[in-house]
């Protein structure tokens, strides 16, 4: 096993023991590598099929994206899922190969082992050990290939959510195939690989725009909302992850059952959507970011539904193990998985019946938090915001989007938010917000000092807001705005958010709490020299740096 895809990787070098820091076993880590390898094999033939005017089937494209998604940190820990997916990947690969051949494609050049290996499940473990990240020997090539693949995982996650709502774009699928195939090409120069990374960022922008369209056209534009963070007296179901279609299905199916619905972690922004606010049994948000789940699922008392990452393996004595359900790309051995029916629906009745037998949640905090500052809402307030900037009431915006995590060094973000001068505003998205969204930071002339746009994919909103401000101030370059970027990352969706920002030309992004282990020194140097990427320092030094003091 060797995995270095997330921020919590062992010693900021790589997880190479029997179990990763996230709890992923060696077996699962290796099978994930083999699945990615099989997807590369599919991609080689998909490209050939496309050259002849063909296109992979819908279920094949969806399989590709959900498979990439399943390998994201904390998404799926279930070995059996990966064995099945690998077998299915080889079937799809061979089916696409046959269709490409039938269409007249010349397949004689497709000789890579991933396009032809056809072992049985009994052989997967041994094979998997030979196809991982370290199979690429040159550390810079490995770094750029993996940066591309991690970006693609983010693209695939967001693309999957959009797909669930019926929104898709074949260009994004085609790019993913091209990029996966390119990671096998030993003839690519470092410059070509850097260009591939940038192109991945372009598709990051496209997929976030697609998901934004899917979410807002289906459920309305997020609006300013006060979200209750206490607990009621009815039993509840806690829903986590990012999939709004699952959210809607759960709200519909729980209506009139006497069971309330609460969001956890990244599902908090569901509270901001008009289509969900109409449900009176949608109580509010319970708890904090993903990594607090071991305590918060205990006190919640009722069932929990994961629609995506981030799952933390429960402790041996966890009482909630039997009341956690997964759906979509995520999974954990022992958690019940709710499959999608052939018509695309999901039946959550087992979760609802279980909830009815559970005690109401224990209240762990009380009050309300305010959010819903996605692009439409902020642009509606643009005059107020622009006036505040022009009058000097707002000196600077800080984009503090991304992820939260369990390591102590993330206390930096709470301290940084506290130390920011009172004439600054934080623009946030993703679970990073939990480090400061409950602090009493006040407002500036009615504009809250923490503006939460939504989930990590809603970082797209932050970009739209920045571009609107650029136009409003008549600036040429988005970097001329009084906006600083101090972003926290954890997993691969944050990687695609970062690549999207770089593609859009945003400079001088500070990334923490540590720089990715998968950036080799040379690749890190390119990012520093070309984009001004930097890590974080002490709160005091960074405030001085950002405020130009
Ligand atoms: Fe957080 Fe987890 Fe949304 Fe991530 S819950 S860490 S970047 O999955 O996707 O922000
Ligand atoms: Fe380690 Fe992160 Fe990989 Fe888990 S996802 S094995 S913590 S690098």
Image (cartoon, helix red, strand yellow):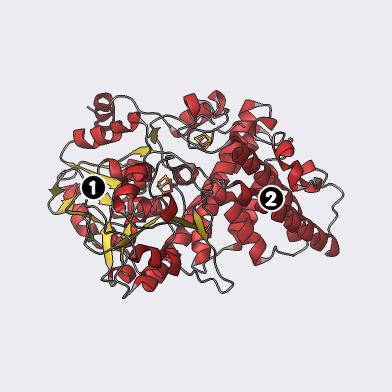
Q: Is disc 1 placed on a helix, strand or loop?
A: strand
In the foreground, 506 or 81: 81
Spatial CA span between label 1 and label 2: 44 Å
On screen, residue 30 above or below 263: above
Q: Position of residue 157 (x, y in %)?
A: 51, 53
User: Which disc is residue 86 wearing?
Assistant: 2
What residue is rendered at 75% in x and 64% in y?
A: 53
Q: Is disc 2 placed on a helix, strand or loop?
A: helix
Would residue 482 be visible to someone looking at this image?
no
View extreme (left): residue? 445
How would you rate the neighbour count of disc 2 (Cα within 10 Å): few for under 14, some for 14-19, many for 20 or more?
many
On screen, residue 513 above or below 251: above
Q: Looking at the rendering, which quadrant does residue 262 occupy?
A: bottom left
What residue is rendered at 20% in x and 36% in y?
A: 418
In the foreground, 324 or 265: 324
* 150 sits to left or right of 541: right
User: Which disc is residue 450 wearing?
Assistant: 1
On screen, residue 511 above or below 91: above
Q: Looking at the rendering, which quadrant does residue 99 occupy?
A: bottom right
Mark 1 or 2, nearer chain start: 2
């Amino acid at each position: 096993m060797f995995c270095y895809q997330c921020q919590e990787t062992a010693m900021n070098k790589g997880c190479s023991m029997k179990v990763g820091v996230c709890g992923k076993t060696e077996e699962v880590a290796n099978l994930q590598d083999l699945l990615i390898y099989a997807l590369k094999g599919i991609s080689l033939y998909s490209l050939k099929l496309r050259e002849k005017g063909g296109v992979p089937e819908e279920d094949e494209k969806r399989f590709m994206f959900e498979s990439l998604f399943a390998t994201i940190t904390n998404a799926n820990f279930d070995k059996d899922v990966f064995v099945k997916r690998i077998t299915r990947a080889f079937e799809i690969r061979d089916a696409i190969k046959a269709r490409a051949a039938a269409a007249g494609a010349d397949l004689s050049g497709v000789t890579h082992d991933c396009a032809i290996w056809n072992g049985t499940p009994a052989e997967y473990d041994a094979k998997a050990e030979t196809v991982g990240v370290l199979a690429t020997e040159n550390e810079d090539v490995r770094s750029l290939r993996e940066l591309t693949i991690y970006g693609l995982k983010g693209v695939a996650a967001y693309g999957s959510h959009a797909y669930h709502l019926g929104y898709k774009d074949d260009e994004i699928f085609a790019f993913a195939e091209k990029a996966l195939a390119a990671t096998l090409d030993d003839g690519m120069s470092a410059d070509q690989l850097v260009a591939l990374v940038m192109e991945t960022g372009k598709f990051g922008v496209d997929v976030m725009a697609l998901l934004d369209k899917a979410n807002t056209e289906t459920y309305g534009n997020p609006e300013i909302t006060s979200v209750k963070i206490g607990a009621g007296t009815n039993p509840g179901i806690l829903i986590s992850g990012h999939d709004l279609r699952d959210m809607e299905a759960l709200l519909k199916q729980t209506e009139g059952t006497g069971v309330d619905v609460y969001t956890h972690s990244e599902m908090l922004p569901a509270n901001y959507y008009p289509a969900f606010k109409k449900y009176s049994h949608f109580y509010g948000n319970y708890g904090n970011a993903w990594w607090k789940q071991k305590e918060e699922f205990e006190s919640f008392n009722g069932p929990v539904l994961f629609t995506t990452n981030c799952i933390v393996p429960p402790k041996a004595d966890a009482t909630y193990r039997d009341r956690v359900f997964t759906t979509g790309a995520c999974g954990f051995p022992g958690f019940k998985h709710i499959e999608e029916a052939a018509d695309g629906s999901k039946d959550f009745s087992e979760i609802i019946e279980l909830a009815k037998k559970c005690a109401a949640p224990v209240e762990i905090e009380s009050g309300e938090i305010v959010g819903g500052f996605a692009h439409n809402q902020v642009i509606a307030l643009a005059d107020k915001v622009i006036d505040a900037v022009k009058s000097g009431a707002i000196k600077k915006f800080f984009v503090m989007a991304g992820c939260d995590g369990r390591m102590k060094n993330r206390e930096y973000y709470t301290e940084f938010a506290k130390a920011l001068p009172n004439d600054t505003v934080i623009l946030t998205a993703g679970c990073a917000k939990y480090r400061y969204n409950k602090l009493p930071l006040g407002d500036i002339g009615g504009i809250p000092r923490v503006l939460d746009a939504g989930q990590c994919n809603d970082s797209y909103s932050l970009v739209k807001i920045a571009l609107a401000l650029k136009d409003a101030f008549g600036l040429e370059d988005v970097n001329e705005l009084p906006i600083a970027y101090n972003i926290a990352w954890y997993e691969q969706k944050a990687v695609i958010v970062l690549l999207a920002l770089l593609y859009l030309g945003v400079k001088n992004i500070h990334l923490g709490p540590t720089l990715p282990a998968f950036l080799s020194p040379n690749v890190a140097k390119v990012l520093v020299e070309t984009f001004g990427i930097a890590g974080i320092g002490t709160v005091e030094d960074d405030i001085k740096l950002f405020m130009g003091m």
